[in-house]
Image: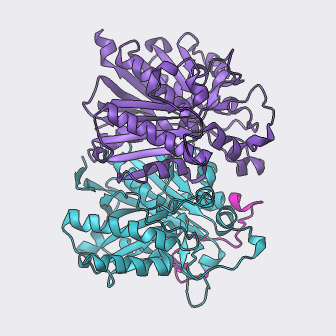
Chain colours: A purple, B cyan
Amino acid sequence: MAIRKGRTIIFDKGINIRSSAAAVGVKEGKGPLAAYFDHIAEDDMMGEATWEKAEIRLQKTALEKALSKASLSAGELDMILAGDLLAQCIASVFSARETGVPFFGQYGACSTMAQELIIGSLLCESGAFSRVAAVTSSHFCSAERQFRMPLEYGGQRTLTAQWTVTGAGAVILEENSSDIRIADAVPGVITDMKVKDTANMGAAMAPAAADTILTYLRDMNAAPSDFDMILTGDLGNVGSELLVELLRREGTDISSVHNDCGKLIFDQSEQDVHSGGSGCGCCASVLSSCIANMLYTGKLSNILFIATGALMSPVSSAQGESIPGIAHLVHIVSEKGCKG
Amino acid sequence: MAIRKGRTIIFDKGINIRSSAAAVGVKEGKGPLAAYFDHIAEDDMMGEATWEKAEIRLQKTALEKALSKASLSAGELDMILAGDLLAQCIASVFSARETGVPFFGQYGACSTMAQELIIGSLLCESGAFSRVAAVTSSHFCSAERQFRMPLEYGGQRTLTAQWTVTGAGAVILEENSSDIRIADAVPGVITDMKVKDTANMGAAMAPAAADTILTYLRDMNAAPSDFDMILTGDLGNVGSELLVELLRREGTDISSVHNDCGKLIFDQSEQDVHSGGSGCGCCASVLSSCIANMLYTGKLSNILFIATGALMSPVSSAQGESIPGIAHLVHIVSEKGCKG
């Protein structure tokens, strides 16, 4: 049985990450993490007729790769938890449609992967399920036309704007299946500092990340230096700077161990992404590839993964609403790292 | 600890429904269930400037009423699970924004309430949480303009079309809190019989409901006559007829115990809703009001609640995709009924 200490969930034995995989688009495949991705698309249409269908293909590919790395078929899963940025989560629905596996759609915007890791671990902890897949995706083109402008319009982007990652990540959770363990977690609370600039999501999400990280450190009586890495996703450059500053004001300095998936996925001097990457697929593909690899090989042994989401829609913003942020935290431990 | 038998989850002690409430719109308040609703709006704008904000108000009201019936404040909840039909689930996000309670957005279209009851019960069963709210809503006007036509267009509706309910339901789950118990559940699998008519959602969802019900009866070695009521939501008239027929072909006759929330909520001879009600708020408001009342008073003691969802979006339909359906089942038992 899991227990709770304040807002922090402490898993009994911990749930393991049995395998993970990432499938990404062309631009991501030219970035600094290229060597870690399980699949890099040759073009961003993925052989499909529309960007939405390409995103579905991407999400399917990530799950297939994660299953294949664990020598599993889809039918051996107890549950798929999946989410994306598209209205009515269609990338996830159509990606899971032919699996025959029970399905619960999740929506936490770019925080979805962490939400799924927490729910998935609790579903395993409850005894009802033993193997759960957590999957998310985003696609630059399907997201741009939904949230911003038609791509053909060729609009200029402000320097605070982030670039939606074309990518999908899949994680298979299962007890006693590997050396990588989800030890504890903090589900996020919606935080709204009344930021209304949809070209500056980092600013809207940073306060939520600060709240969740402070809650965890307080609940567990821990310090930033206890961790190899405090990895947010996806605050980008502007949001990361704000997060470090917000925490500094509370007497907590994470600067020496902090990094952000939105900063890691692109080469910022070469790839012109302004404030960095974003989208459900950003932190999911970084976690499922590079970070998972470093945990499996023992290069990282003790990290906090905090996925942040901007919970607005084009309609809420058009109606003058601010952008509510949320951040869910997952503490991941590698026993390999501990032993090594 | 919960266990699983086939696809059916069997809860250890069962999680109780501590309280529930429903808030509905004007038309629903003139229907046959009027006496059971906790709040009936005086007009469908609920004093707000837009239909989306009205839906947010509706969802907030349902949760407030459910909390107040349990003498609880929002701060005493461990978690809010909420979902709706709007893109990026904004009715749920903005409704939960000021609660300060951890939040996980859920998306299962009209099946969302059952999905939340299953996840919520498992979160309690895991030991991590002791009190979880499950909330959903829909609003005729916000749904029409998102999924179909601008209301001002005054489009004709086909006779197979259902009427999206303006309503919200909230359920508070907590162990050892009442005589109403969630005993077991079946999470649904996506079923797609290639129906493409978005004005006939009942036909798209009926096969999913049939699959889930058959799975449960098989897993538990049960018969329809074991239950006081097999309540689907929201297949409407067309979908209900199809469900009964699909099950009959499999040798299972549910006709004497079957009813559907989409058939119950409106007076079909007077209220001109064609094939009945639909929307996340339909089965949620019927369950949280009339059905909960009949369970609390012992008029019902043993029911299957099966919420069905049509997992399409305007974009997926415009791109020629069919409508995937899903149905999640929850077996609810009233100890009051058993004793009485």
> Residue lying farthest bottom?
B269
Quarter of the image that includes the C terminus of chain A: top left
**Residue beneath the point at 21% across and 70% down:** B222
Residue A5, relative to residue A258: is it above or below?
Answer: below
Q: Would you say the magenta stretch is mainly helix, strand or loop?
A: loop
Residue A231, relative to residue B36: is it above or below?
Answer: above
Along the viewing direction, whichever of A143 and B132 lies nearer the viewer? A143
> Residue lying farthest left?
B221
**Residue beneath the point at 77% across and 25% down:** A159
Q: x%, y% of residue B229?
A: 34, 77
Residue A170, relative to residue B226: is it above or below?
Answer: above
Range shown magenta: B30-53
**Residue beneath the point at 28% across and 45% down:** A76
Q: Is residue A168 left or right of residue A316?
A: left
Quarter of the image that includes the N terminus of chain A: top left
**Residue beneath the point at 79% across and 37% down:** A154
Q: x%, y% of residue A54?
A: 56, 43
Q: x%, y% of residue B184?
A: 29, 59
Q: Is residue A334 left or right of residue B225?
A: right
Along the viewing direction, whichever of A214 and A309 lies nearer the viewer? A309
Q: Is residue B32 magenta?
A: yes
Q: Is residue A3 visible?
A: no
